[in-house]
Amino acid sequence: MFDWMASPEAWAALATLTALEIVLGIDNIIFLTILVGRLPPEQRHSARVLGLGLAMITRIMLLVSLAWVAKLTHPLFVVPVGGFEITGRDLVLLLGGLFLLVKATLEIHAAVEGEGDKAEADRAVPHAAYVGTLVQIAIIDIVFSLDSVITAVGMANDIPVMVLAVIAAVAVMMFAARPLGDFVDRHPTAKVLALAFLVMIGTALIAEGCGVHVHKAYLYVAMAFSVSVEMLNIRMRRNSQGGSPPAGA
């Protein structure tokens, strides 16, 4: 079981997979931040920890179920119009993308139009909202994990290496989730930007499910550019709120 520890290739694979899991976890952190932000402040930290814990468990379960993951890439049926094959992975990506689009659209509407009845409902059934948030995090993580798990299977031959990479990546995500969540809570425009990212990610997932490959690098470059512009806007607003000296001073 520990034979891989004497292999330099296994350590290189561990470092590479950990970095890959962290990068691919950006989507997960954004989604988790939005969902947790709907909970009362006293429940947010535990929801982050439990949500990422569930994410880690689902990824490890996918890694252990290698035979099932491999079958997801096998064609299930052929679409008559266009003649392209649909696999289990495609169906998961399609459903996950649709879920993200619907969820992000509803959250954008709530953010723009005001919290309204949804916030009242969340306060009325806090336990249900808490459990529902954790369930949504666990489900959507399966969608986000598919590509990284399939890539991990292709890059490493040892299950312990892949599991350690997932655990290390989740530990980093736990460290980053709270500061990111606090930042989004303090800046409403950043929350709308994060929701726009979810719309983009959902669209990319649907495209992938339909057989159109969208390179992740394009999404991350767009995210990085948008975040840079938002940081400039935040600094500009902060400077303007500081006020200017009175005339004649």
Image: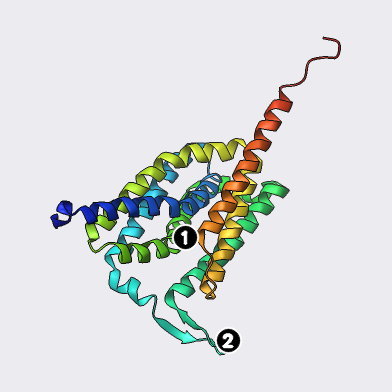
Which residue is at the front of the view, 92 or 128?
A: 92
Q: Residue at x 51, y 66 (%)?
A: 96
Query: Tag 1's secondary structure?
Result: helix
- 23 sits left or right of 111 in the view: left
Which residue has dot 1 on it?
Answer: 140
Q: Indicate whether 87 appears above or below 64.
A: below
Which residue is at the front of the view, 240 or 112?
A: 240
Which residue has dot 2 on it?
Answer: 82
For residue 161, which quarter of the picture?
A: bottom left
Q: Residue at x 43, y 84 (%)?
A: 76
Q: Where is residue 46 in the image (x, y as percent from the top left)?
A: 42, 42
Query: Tag 2's secondary structure?
Result: loop
Which residue is at the front of the view, 47 or 20?
A: 20
Q: Residue furthest top?
A: 249
Q: Which residue lies furthest to the bottom in this view?
A: 80
- 213 sits left or right of 165 in the view: right
Q: Dot 1, how many residues are within 10 Å of its Cα: few (below 14), some (14-19), or many (20+)? A: many
